[in-house]
Amino acid sequence: MALQILNQGPPPEEVADRIREAIAAAVEEAVIEVRPRGPGHFEITVVATAFEGKSRVQQHQIVYGAITELMSGPQAPVHAVDRLDCRTP
């Protein structure tokens, strides 16, 4: 059986921009940092007043909800969020 190399998708920097845009659309006035860590793997930091009074799980649900489309399907550009840090200012 021959090894088949699949399309690795868009460059990590482009995907990081898409992640940033999706989170910015969902979380007002957020300061967002997205760092590519490998094909399809990212670390994300989000600082926003929208997280005040919310549990860590609720904060993460907001961010994952914003990027669900980027993590869905067989050719999803985001395979994993290796680290998600949500904070209030």
Image: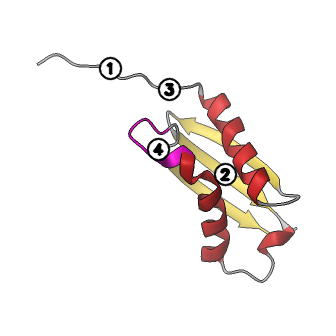
| Numbered mark located on residue 5 in the image | 1
Would you say the residues marked 3 and 2 are in contact, meaning their CB atoms lie under 8 Å apart? no
Residue 82 to residue 74: above or below = below
Real-space Cα separation, disc 3 to disc 1, in angstroms: 12 Å
Residue highlighted by disc 2: 44
Residue farthest toward the bottom in the current orientation of the protein: 53
Image location (x, y in percent) of residue 68: 55, 53
Q: Residue at x 35, y 23 (%)?
A: 6
Mark 2 or 1: the one toward you: 1
In magenta, the rendered stretch is 70-76
Would you say the residues marked 1 and 4 are in contact, meaning their CB atoms lie under 8 Å apart? no
Residue highlighted by disc 3: 9
- Secondary structure beneath dot 1 equals loop
Would you say the residues marked 2 and 4 are in contact, meaning their CB atoms lie under 8 Å apart? no
What is the quadrant of the N terminus in the image? top left
Image location (x, y in percent) of residue 8: 45, 25
Residue highlighted by disc 4: 79
Q: Badge 3: how crowded within 10 Å, few (<14), some, or many (20+)?
A: some
Q: Residue at x 58, y 55 (%)?
A: 83
Mark found first going from the N terminus, 1 or 4? 1
Q: Residue at x 16, y 16 (%)?
A: 2
Mark found first going from the N terminus, 3 or 2? 3
What is the quadrant of the C terminus in the image? bottom right
- Secondary structure beneath dot 3 equals loop
Real-space Cα separation, disc 3 to disc 2, in angstroms: 20 Å
Mark 3 or 2: the one toward you: 3
Real-space Cα separation, disc 2 to disc 1, in angstroms: 28 Å
